[in-house]
Image (cartoon, rainbow, N blue to C red):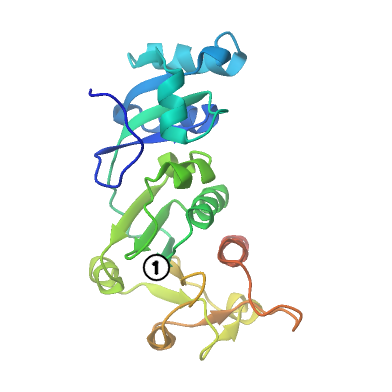
């Protein structure tokens, strides 16, 4: 493998920066891991030892790579990372889905991936233009949850619908919506899809004609909820009804 450089979207590999995300990559996507990087200052620590043992058991190369870690992370306190090949998954047709339409913030997307996994939703779609799900910032924000999920990126929402027809759609928006408690009091099919829009603009008006629009009720002290917060509330409600 050639020398490592800062992440670029056109590369066929990316980085899982941090000991915990790197461990999650090794545990859940071992076939994708190309090598593990450890900082010399982390040698002998419990986290580094655990990471090294697992990598060696999987026959993955481990390197002491201080300069590479600083270069790829842009930080001085990144003490471990996994280098992994990018992957693509098919979403499970009968399972619940979360769809993120044009999300623009890596931190939000990473947090939503972690939340979805925590509540048992393992299938997530992103609609372009969107955050690069393999950007190390997204991977780190997900705390490695990316490696336990089935994630697929579509060029447009029509592509998602063509691949998964007949699903019960619940776009989160104001137009034509019912409140989340009202929706959850009704019948919810097993193959539901929650759709969340861009952080700034939300979902386009045409989504009001798709499925049952949902709004999260709140008082008038705020104008809207952060995307990751709204997604967490929606996912929790649908999985715990």
Q: Is residue 191 visible to the viewer in this orientation of the structure? A: no
Residue 204 percent coordinates (x, y): 41, 82
Q: Nearer the viewer, residue 221 or 144?
A: 221
Q: Determine whether 213 is above or below 110 in the image.
A: below
In which image quadrant can residue 193 be found? Answer: bottom left
In the image, taking residue 85 as reference, residue 41 lies left or right, namely: right
For the point 33% across and 65% down, the residue is 129
For the point 53% across and 45% down, the residue is 141
For the point 53% across and 57% down, the residue is 108
In which image quadrant can residue 86 be found? Answer: top left
**If the image is split into quadrants, where does the C terminus sit?**
bottom right
Residue 51 percent coordinates (x, y): 49, 18
Residue 165 percent coordinates (x, y): 28, 72
For the point 32% across and 13% down, the residue is 59
Label 1 belongs to which residue? Answer: 102
Q: Secondary structure at mark 1?
A: loop
**If the image is split into quadrants, where does the N terminus sit?**
top left
Q: Residues within 10 Å of mark 1 (few under 14, many from 20)?
A: many
In which image quadrant can residue 13 be found? Answer: top left
Q: Nearer the viewer, residue 73 or 54?
A: 73
């Amino acid at each position: 493998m050639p020398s490592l450089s800062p992440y670029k979207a056109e590369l066929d590999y990316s980085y899982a920066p941090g000991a915990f995300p790197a461990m999650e990559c090794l545990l859940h996507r071992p076939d994708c891991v190309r090598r593990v990087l450890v900082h010399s200052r982390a040698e002998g620590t419990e986290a580094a030892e655990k990471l090294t043992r697992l990598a060696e058991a999987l026959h993955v190369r481990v390197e002491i790579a201080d300069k590479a870690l600083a270069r790829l992370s842009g930080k001085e306190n990144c003490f471990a990372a996994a280098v992994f090949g990018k992957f693509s998954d098919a979403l499970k047709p009968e399972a619940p889905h979360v769809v993120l339409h044009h999300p623009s913030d890596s931190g939000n997307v990473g947090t939503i991936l972690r939340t979805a996994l925590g509540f048992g939703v393992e299938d997530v779609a992103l609609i372009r233009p969107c955050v690069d799900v393999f950007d190390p910032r997204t991977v780190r924000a997900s705390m490695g949850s990316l490696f336990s999920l089935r994630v697929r990126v579509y060029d447009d929402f029509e592509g998602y619908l063509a691949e998964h027809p007949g699903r019960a759609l619940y776009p989160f928006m104001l137009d034509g919506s019912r409140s989340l408690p009202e929706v959850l009091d009704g019948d919810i099919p097993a193959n539901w899809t929650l759709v969340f829009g861009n952080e700034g603009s939300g979902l386009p008006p045409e989504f009001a004609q798709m499925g049952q629009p949902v709004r999260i009720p709140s008082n008038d002290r705020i104008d809207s909820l952060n995307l990751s917060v709204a997604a967490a509330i929606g996912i929790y409600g649908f999985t715990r009804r």
